[in-house]
Image (cartoon, grey):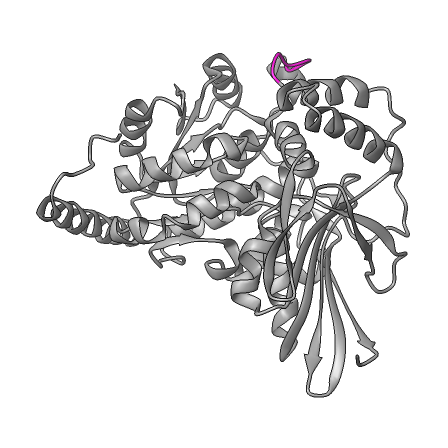
Amino acid sequence: MGSNETSSEGESRHVTACTCDSVLNERIALRKGVSMKILALGGAGDMGRAAVTTLLGMFGISSVTVADANYELAERFVRLIAAGNLSAAPIDVRDRSALHSLIEKHDLVVSTVGPYYKYGKTVVEACISAGRSGIDINDDWEPTLDILALHEKAKNAGITYITGMGSSPGLLNLMALQASRALEQVESIMTAWSLNGGWQSGPKQPFHVARRLLGLGDAERPNAAIEHLFHECSSTVPTYRDGNLVGVDSMTSAGSLQFPGYADRQVFHVGHPEPITLPKTSNAKSVSNVMFGDKEIFDLIRRIADSIKRGRLSVEDGAHSFEDEAKNLAPVSSNIDDPPGLCSVVTGWTGEKRKKIAWGLIRGPYGLMAGVTAVPLAIAARMIADGRIAKRGVFPPESSVDPERLFAEFAPYCGENLGSDDIIIRREEALDSV
């Protein structure tokens, strides 16, 4: 338990008042040009490094601390960038006392510590205890429920915490929100992502450090994103149907993704948080999160996930097996008929007209999935830092982040002189009434 936890109602009120005063002082300092000190938890990982390099290029960030369990890698990363406002720190987020103390020394926490089903709630609780705002790229549905349940505690502590501000969830939520706003009544939402990628990448950022310079080869531990994938692909996951959250077997068919102007693709259920959070803001009757891609990679995922379900492999061993076997697969295809690699397809009504509104990302930042996940995270973190996101409590992206502002700031990372209209394709299609 953090050292700031209190044992009486009076003490709790005092801490809350002090925290709120601290928040006010931070805003006044920002207006005077004094910037925020950012703590990048998990900052030496693939997603973390992309977030750190993005933050370093932003105006008004006074310092960034790369805190990671792999302190040697964090130091190497910091040394190669050689920026005066960047430093490294060791941290094991399971050590709650050390985590609390480290967070207290900073103004804002940016967490890429995964997998989130292991560590997501721990970080949020530490932020609340330390009275510091934070943001993460949580893509697991179970901790999303736990984290959202901390809303009142975060509100009382005077902090803002946004969970799931990456690509899926994150960009997909905001695209679904914007598409939903074009309809008077929302019927269904499908948020979809491709294992193949499927967007054009922008240029390298100024502080980018190549993996080979960091000496990153075959890791002793599997990538947290791969662990997450197999955790979700070997269990029952939520989807939202006819106004109810229901469980379905992961990797089962969710029908077809029908994005106007592209070939239909078979898609499969996966356990991301969109079906939990989007119904609350869209009033949709059905929400699903799905993935699609080449048959060969799906066959491999399904085979390993089945071994995990049967108890023959642990999630971590399954992730190792995938990383080993995936190297022998043919390169993923680049099919121009495929829908955009990140897209949201919404159906509903405007008056008596039934419509489909689809939004898809066609250009993204450098770094493939790391770039398209970490850059939105960093932009939203900056919005918290400069007061543009000021509401207190715990929120998903769609109820806290202004989509138009985020996409406008996201676009330049996808290519020089680009705006949101250049990176997102929007399609509308009339549907038969049912």
Side of 165 relative to 308 (left or right):
left
The answer to whether one can see residue 137 in this image is no
SS assignment for the magenta stretch, majority: loop
Q: Answer above or below: position of 23 versus 208.
A: below
Observer-nearest of 286 and 25: 286
At which x and y percent is residue 364? 69, 46
Q: Which residue corresponds to the image point at 88% horizontal and 56% vertical from the top-left?
A: 264
Side of 414 relative to 22 (left or right):
right
Q: Which residue corresponds to the image point at 44% horizontal and 32% vertical from the top-left?
A: 40
At which x and y percent is residue 416? 67, 49
Q: Answer above or below: position of 286 versus 208.
A: below
Query: Residue 217 colored magenta?
Result: yes
Segment colored magenta: 216-221
Side of 133 relative to 206 (left or right):
left
Query: Residue 376 colored magenta?
Result: no
Q: Which residue corresponds to the image point at 29% horizontal and 44% vertical from the top-left?
A: 34
Observer-nearest of 418 and 222: 222
